[in-house]
Image: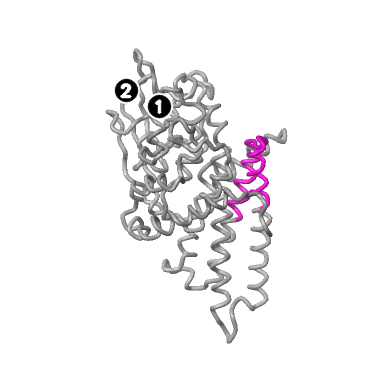
């Protein structure tokens, strides 16, 4: 089904994203996979192509765009290639909005020029060893010491944890206030007491630098408080919908690419003297996947339009996130099955897609948490 959500300027950016992937990503993907991390230079290259910073204020070197459809175009093209790419979605869709909406003029002057060029890489640290989707379980604390904050605690599963220069840390600043006692503090590379632990050994997405972070009495200037003191939970709730929509966009685009390559395989691979796609069962499976992806794409595009119209909320984000990622999981699993034994071989992209997409129903809020959020919105 033809999509109508994008305009010519979005498709122009899509072509730019494809050139970036062809020239800067594809030639280096195997090296990044072997090294277990994407080179920092990939971010600065993305800056030169205009793939980061386009949604930042023009006075700090950005493009000044508030149109999330530009974000979606980049996410889609990277998802089609796979996960041997820089974490531009973390930079643009997850971390960037916090700096854009919450930073003071002084903070923007310090951080945004480098952020828009890719010289400074961002991350956000929410999850902890004992607190994932349950933010109420966060134990990292920050206490005032004169004009500064003293930050102590640890975080895990932090995307861009190794490469990042600016880490937005969620910490308890008023332990007695429950969810009203969180604040966001920006920890900068090189601060004393800030250490990066091991790069986590994941089953998929090997080039994505997911890491453990620790903070031992890190002295953070009061000028690094992002947003309002003790309003961190509300700041998170305001920004999480864009993260979840970005994950949904990637899930559908990636699953669609997996299906495209599987269709070609089903035409080329023969069994019992005929293409495997010509068997009725296989035809039906492929027909179902194609239909479901078309339906999901329409819902994702409607959500993108809702963002443009200022009519997108946390419940919408939860719905599109859980549905799209669960669908992607089913699509990739079915496509691997259609590849037979070859689907289990890492030389085939479908095998990497199988392990790479599995995390999508977990990060950004698990499927179960998304359903609970939706259920509570129904008065249950």
Disc 1 to disc 2, how far (Cα)?
A: 21 Å
Question: In the rendered image, is residue 312 in sight?
Answer: yes
Residue on which disc 1 sits: 109
Query: For residue 150: magenta?
Result: no
The quarter of the rendered structure image containing the C terminus is top right
Checking the image for residue 242, the label placed there is none
Q: Is residue 34 above or below residue 179?
A: below
Query: Is 147 on the left or on the right of 367, as rendered?
Result: left
Q: Nearer the viewer, residue 139 or 163?
A: 163
Residue on which disc 2 sits: 219
Percent of width and height locating residue 225 = 42, 23
Q: Residue at x 54, y 78 (%)?
A: 268
Q: Nearer the viewer, mark 1 or mark 2?
A: 1
Residue range highlighted in magenta: 298-327
Percent of width and height locating residue 15 = 51, 55
Percent of width and height locating residue 360 = 52, 50
Query: For residue 324: magenta?
Result: yes
How packed mark 1 is, by other alpha carbons closer than 10 Å (few <14, some 14-19, many 20 or more), is few
Picture quadrant where residue 226 is located: top left
- Secondary structure under tag 1 reads helix
Q: Residue at x 53, y 66 (%)?
A: 336
Query: Is 354 on the left or on the right of 207, as rendered?
Result: right
Q: Residue at x 54, y 41 (%)?
A: 243
Question: In the rendered image, is residue 212 in sight?
Answer: no
């Amino acid at each position: 089904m033809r999509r109508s959500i994008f305009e010519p300027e979005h498709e122009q950016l899509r072509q730019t994203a494809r050139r970036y992937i062809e020239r800067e990503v594809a030639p280096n993907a195997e090296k990044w996979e072997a090294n277990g991390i994407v080179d920092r230079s990939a971010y600065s290259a993305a800056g030169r192509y205009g793939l980061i910073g386009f949604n930042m204020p023009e006075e700090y070197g950005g493009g000044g765009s508030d149109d999330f459809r530009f974000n979606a175009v980049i996410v889609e093209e990277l998802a089609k290639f796979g996960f041997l790419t820089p974490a531009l979605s973390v930079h643009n869709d997850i971390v960037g909005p916090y700096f854009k909406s919450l930073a003071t003029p002084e903070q923007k002057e310090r951080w945004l020029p480098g952020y828009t060029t890719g010289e400074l890489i961002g991350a956000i640290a929410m999850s902890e060893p004992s607190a994932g989707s349950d933010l109420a379980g966060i134990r990292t604390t920050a206490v005032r010491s004169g004009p500064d904050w003293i930050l102590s605690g640890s975080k895990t599963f932090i995307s861009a944890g190794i490469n990042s220069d600016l880490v937005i840390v969620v910490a308890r600043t008023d332990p007695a206030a429950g969810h009203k006692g969180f604040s966001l503090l920006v920890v900068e590379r090189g601060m004393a007491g800030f250490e990066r632990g091991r790069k986590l050994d994941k089953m998929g997405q090997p080039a994505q630098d997911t890491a453990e972070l620790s903070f031992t009495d890190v002295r953070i200037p009061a000028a690094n408080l992002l947003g309002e003191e003790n309003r961190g939970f509300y700041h998170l709730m305001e920004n999480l919908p864009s993260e979840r929509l970005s994950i949904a966009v990637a899930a559908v685009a990636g699953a669609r690419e997996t299906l495209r390559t599987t269709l070609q395989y089903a035409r080329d691979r023969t069994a019992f003297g005929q293409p495997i796609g010509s068997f009725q069962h296989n035809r039906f499976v492929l027909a179902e996947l194609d239909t479901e992806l078309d339906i999901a794409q329409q819902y994702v595009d409607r959500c993108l339009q809702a963002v443009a119209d200022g009519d997108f909320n946390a419940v919408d984000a939860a719905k599109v996130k859980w549905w799209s990622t669960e669908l992607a999981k089913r699509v990739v699993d079915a496509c691997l099955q259609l590849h037979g034994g070859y689907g289990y071989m890492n030389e085939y992209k479908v095998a990497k897609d199988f392990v790479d997409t599995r995390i999508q129903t977990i990060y950004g809020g698990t499927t179960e948490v998304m359903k609970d959020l939706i259920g509570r919105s129904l008065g249950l």
